[in-house]
Image (cartoon, helix red, strand yellow):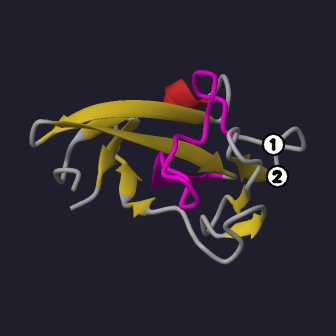
Amino acid sequence: MIKPKTFLCHALDLDATGAKEIVLEQNGARVSVFVVKNGEEVLGYVNACPHARLPLNWREDMFFDLSGRYLLCANHGAHFDIATGKCVRGPCVGQSLTPLSVRVDGGGDIIANP
């Protein structure tokens, strides 16, 4: 889906909210993904709740619940484990976000992994 080695954002872009949405043009279609900090790790997911395929966020780069412990679907209140993307509360319990393999290169750029 996402081309390998696609630049997504800079690691510093995660400092404000802990997450960053990126909308990419892939094969003529717009694809929304996001990257998120989990401690020192950076993870990537497709920005679509498995319940209704809607984006998780209503506001720019806002993906966490109030506690900061879970990713939150603002549309239906589903809560997702940050490390695994698995839904732990809400209408899609047991389903998961679609992972996106990412890495941070030596210059601090976050790119899609091959």
Disc 1 and disc 2 in contact, CB within 8 angstroms = yes
Question: Badge 2 is on which residue?
Answer: 69
Evaluate whether residue 88 shows in this view: yes
Judge the density around disc 1: few (<14), some (14-19), many (≥20) Cα neighbours within 10 Å: some
Could you tell whether 45 is left or right of 110 in the image?
A: right
Q: In which quarter of the image is the C terminus?
A: bottom left
Where residue 26 sits, quadrant-wise, is top left
Instruction: Give the numbered dot on residue 65.
Output: 1
Above or below, 37 against 20 in this view is below
Question: What residue range appears in magenta?
Answer: 40-63
Helix, strand or loop for disc 1: loop
Residue 55 falls inside the magenta stretch: yes
| Image point (58%, 22%), residue name | 60
Q: Position of residue 37 (x, y in %)?
A: 61, 46
Q: Identify the amino acid type marked 1.
A: Asp
Could you tell whether 1 is left or right of 68 in the image?
A: left
Above or below, 61 against 87 in this view is above
Q: Where is residue 80 in the image (x, y as percent from the top left)?
A: 70, 60
